[in-house]
Amino acid sequence: MASEEKPTDSVHGASVGVHASDAANSWRNIARVTNHRNLVCSLIVGAWHTAGQTGYISDIPFPFDLDAIQSKKLDADALLVELDSSIQSKDQAKAMAVVKSWEITGNPPKPIFDCLRRYAVSEDGALHAEKYFRTVTEEFATTRAEFRWRHLIGLARVSASEYGWPAPGRDQARDLLRT
């Protein structure tokens, strides 16, 4: 659903993947803190809600060229520079490849979270940027090790998608913090 406010290939804001991830995370969190009856209901509603999005997604995974990043043999500092650069150039595929390369090299996740947090609070994800960052933080902590980095790879794509759309109130907040 491209528009002037949401360009083609935009995955920020109320996109299917971001929305489904946020919703599934919310329903799981409700299920964790309630009685058995509501736990079952929450999981059913969460599954129904997420499954309801399937008509809007592609069966083809979003491609990214990991080999292009891996061939550069970048160290951790260079990978972070590359991640910033790919986000600021709105290169979703490259941002994803950088995070995957970071994972493969065995670097800790904190610097990636720190980098992506800056974009979650500065760019407009149509009210989803901060929420999706929180979702990824929670899901990364609770997902099995072999799958958890997928969340950060998705967040890198969302960050590149939303870059250049300043969050409403960002400049005002910066001015207020300077005074």
Image (cartoon, rainbow, N blue to C red):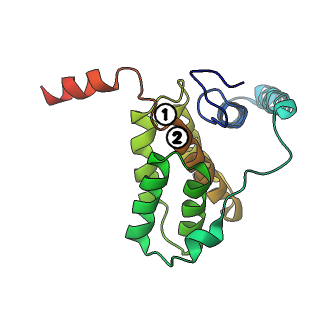
- Residue 52 position in % (x across, y down): 85, 28
Residue 171 against residue 77 in the figure, above or below: above
Q: Which of 14 and 35 is in front in this view?
A: 14
Dot 2 alpha-carbon crowd within 10 angstroms: few under 14, some 14 to 19, many 20 or more: many
Disc 1 + disc 2, Cβ < 8 Å? yes
Residue for badge 1: 130
All told, the count of numbered labels is 2
Q: Is the residue 154 above or below the residue 146 in the image?
A: above
Q: In the shown orientation, is residue 44 left or right of residue 149?
A: right
Q: Which residue is rendered at x = 58% and y = 21% of the image?
A: 4
Q: Is 13 positioned to the left or the right of 41 in the image?
A: left
Secondary structure of the residue carrying tag 1 is: helix
Looking at the rendered structure, the kind of residue marked 2 is: Phe
Residue found at x 81% / y 26%: 45
Seen from the viewer's position, the closer of residues 43 and 14 is 14
Q: Quadrant of residue 138?
A: top right
Q: Where is residue 125 in the image (x, y as percent from the top left)?
A: 53, 30
Please state the horizontal and vertical placement of residue 7, each as a whole percent of the image.
61, 29
Q: Which amino acid does label 1 sit on?
A: Glu
- Location of residue 67 (image quadrant): bottom right
Residue behind mark 2:
133
